[in-house]
Amino acid sequence: MIWRFFNLKTHFKQKSCIDLQQNLKRISQRNLTFFILMTNNLHAKEFINSFISKERKGRCLALLESGEPSFAARLAHLNAFEERFIQPLPKGSPTAQIDFIYKFVDKVYKKDSCYIISEDKVISGKEIPVQGSIELVLGRAFGSILSFIPGKLAYYESESPGPGILFYKH
């Protein structure tokens, strides 16, 4: 990114300093918007490619290509998963399951944030802290995906009552 700004500075050297700052600001905002869309698409695309069954993969990718909100709008009733990547959650209280998920994620994923894709537009498309992320989507009546490592580690919560699904692809 730095080299692009350097080249832009030399390109705009005839312009005033104010024009240069405005152009750099506009280009930075455009690149940031593109980066956010690209990241969003990457997490969703990798989730579909890794964890959705072959029968539904094409349909989900088509929804994603038509726009991320189309895919997110159908998260509440998503149920065609690759069973081999589902990690069993312990029986018992929701608190025990949440603790298990956090411990599992902590063993595999060493960062402090995850990416959320949700029917709830208020929280969808954001990087959020790992701690508290499960509680954020639990029992909200919205389908949501917490993507920790795109295509490798994710948590899915449907709108239906009951435990969510932890996915891990070695």
Image (cartoon, rainbow, N blue to C red):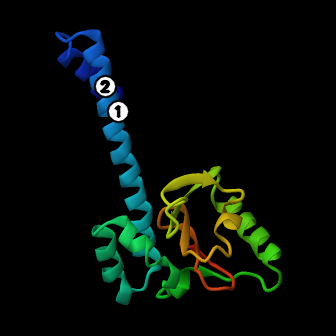
Q: Do the residues labelled 2 and 1 touch (CB within 8 Å)?
A: yes
Task: Using residue 16 as the reference point, say whether residue 63 is left or right of it.
Answer: right
- The residue carrying mark 1 is 28
Task: Kindly identify the residue that appears in the image at 53 percent across and 59 percent down.
Answer: 122
Type of amino acid at the residue the image marks with label 1 = Ser
Q: In this view, does 49 lie above or below 25?
A: below
Q: Which residue is drawn at 29% across and 10% down?
A: 17
> Eyeballing the image, is 39 above or below 8?
below
Identify the element where label 2 is drawn. helix
* Left or right for 23, reference 45: left
Quadrant, the C terminus: bottom right
Q: Can residue 170 be seen in this view?
A: no
Taking depth in this image into account, of 18 and 58 the one nearest to the observer is 18
Displayed quadrant of residue 163: bottom right
Type of amino acid under label 2: Leu
Instruction: Give the x, y percent position of residue 151.
Output: 47, 67
Dot label at residue 107: none
Q: Where is residue 119 in the image (x, y as percent from the top left)?
A: 49, 70
Q: Confirm whether residue 164 shows in the render.
A: yes
User: Quarter-wise, where is residue 2 in the image?
Assistant: top left
Per the rendering, the mark at residue 24 is 2
Q: Is residue 140 left or right of residue 18?
A: right
